[in-house]
Amino acid sequence: FFCWAGNMKFVALLSGGKDSIYATLLALRHGHELVCCAHLAPRRRRLSSSQDDDHHDDEDLEEESYMYQTAGSEAVRLQVEECMGLPFYVREIRGKSRNTSLVYEERGHDEVEDLFHLLQTVQKSHPEIEAVSSGAILSTYQRTRIEHVCQRLRLTSLSYLWRMSSQRALLDGILDDGGIEAVLVRVACPPGLLPQKHLNRNLRSLRDDGTLDDLHGRWGMHPAGEGGEYETLVVDCPALFRFGRLKLEEVVVVCDESDEGVGILRIRKCRVEKKMEKQESGNESEKGNGNKSITSHHYSTTALKGVVDHVAQSAKSQLPTSNSTMQSTIPKSIQNRVIRSMHLPNVRIMKGGLCHISALISPIACDNNYSNNNSNDKVDEAEAAVREFLTITQMLQTLLSRLTSSSTSSITPQDIIYVHLYLSEISHFAKINRHYQQYFGTHLPPSRSCVAVGHRALPGGRRVMMDCILQCDSGRYLRTDAIDENSTTDSFLQRAMANHHHPLRKVLHVQSLSTWAPVCIGPYSQANVLRSSLVFLAGMIGLIPETMRLIQSDGDDYAEGANDWELELHQSWRNAASVLDGLDDGGGVVGGKLEDSLGGLVYL
């Protein structure tokens, strides 16, 4: 995934509501530069002919969307162009929610493709844009689709509200920290919120008079509306709306004909009330630098030996020859000094299809006795490490094919849930990572821990070693919506799909920059969960999530004089705790805590 390497120019995806506006404000505060805003507008759903005589055309309901807020869309252009003074791009939602699985794959006429085309248009006009901000907070459905589109367009997803804080604290942050004034434009929470009573009410007043807290206590309603209980339209945000605020002059309440407890506020007429010159200047710390931009499983030894010999012969045949393109980068002194090792990987298959493969190393390694201070040798050393890694993946592929039994379908790399990668030098990482991505892919990848252990620390002077854990059929499980109920096969997949209480596997793969936990720097997931109970966490380092920089000893949260390694250790635990908390999806997987850990490794 394309991860941030500094302050970026970004486009804000705005619905007009409080979440997307506050997310934009936070992106600015984190140093990013806002260039323009984009919006997906709904198609109108005409009322039945018997109702046409009693309603104005403007009172038609929008078509429902799984992905986007549609209420209040009429006023978004004014928000952007007149209140914020920024370029505005809009596209009508033409697709439907055809792929409603949490795992999104491209499908024609899906509403997610409307977002793709909208951002394509923005890129053509603003090729300098590097990122996209959005207001996703708890919706994995929404976040993963935005990340999918961003990945296709080589953009970074900014999601600074993702799992930001507790329910009430989130609302307080939006209203108090963001200074946002918003009104309700859609309610769907009977009997708590009613269209005729609560639409067009100020959100701050509903909080301050205890209405939202009362509804949370009585009915479990999310105070910030994250369960779809209500949607808002922002009429003012002083840090963003520098030139004016919205005034709703003519509105009408429209109830859904199938549910009187669901309704929207149709805005027939609104205008922008200009702000005084002093207000127009805004907060200087949140402005951009430009004039128009604003700145935020045991396996038999005989069988294993057969695998190793097979791979060794294959790998040896792949060593560079005089006709190879690698001839120019690996000196003959290295090519001619090849050592062999009978070091065999350990393979253990357990009940339930869980399998552990450890100490995977290449049977062939280049001799290291050539090393000197020549910079070209450093490049060749990295290329040799890549060759070892490719040999390991070939060995792993052969092992997977031989592990397949009558109770499993073909085992693939998609069944691998965790990888521990050891490198002799961290300088080999960048080149190896590209090949790692080609092998494991970027879609629902395994969790990974990667550590450099030092020169000649690995067996036989190898440069790369790998351990991995896999769950048979878990890759297919993640990518299968339904199975043939008439099938007579007794596979892990068949049994897993029949178990509606504990999912075989779930993956937490957040690719958006946020304040929650560090974004994955590479093709791995933050966590893989087996049967709602066993969690495999990716390796953590002391990165501050929102900046993706290592924590420094001058941070305000720590005592002066603390060692950097201690600060990084504390931050690593914080990040791990955030990921465990993020596993709570409100369904079959609940969040965990650090005290639930069975074990861990700390590298200093």
Image (cartoon, helix red, strand yellow):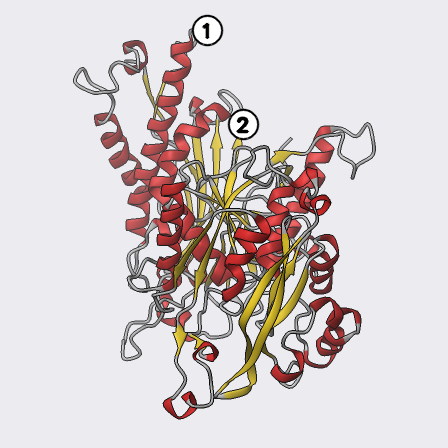
Q: Residue at x 41, y 88 (%)?
A: 52
Q: Which residue is mark 2?
A: 453
At numbered mark 2, what does the secondary structure look like: helix, strand or loop? loop
Q: Nearer the viewer, residue 267 or 4?
A: 267
Q: Please tell me whether mark 2 or mark 1 is closer to you in this view.
A: 1
Residue 600 horizontal/vertical position (percent):
62, 45
Give above or below for 177 relative to 254.
Answer: above
Can residue 287 be seen in this snapshot?
A: yes
Amino acid at the residue labelled 1: Asn
* Screen quadrant of the C terminus: top right
Q: Residue at x 69, y 38 (%)?
A: 284
Q: Nearer the viewer, residue 554 or 426?
A: 554
Q: Residue furthest bottom?
A: 50
Q: Seen in the image, is 53 located left or right of residue 17?
A: left
Give above or below for 413 relative to 461.
Answer: below
Quarter residue 219 falls in: bottom right
Specify few, some or many for label 1: CA neighbours under 10 Å numbering under 14, 14-19, or 20 or more.
few
Q: Nearer the viewer, residue 219 or 27?
A: 27
Residue 487 horizontal/vertical position (percent):
27, 76
Q: Which residue is mark 1?
A: 373
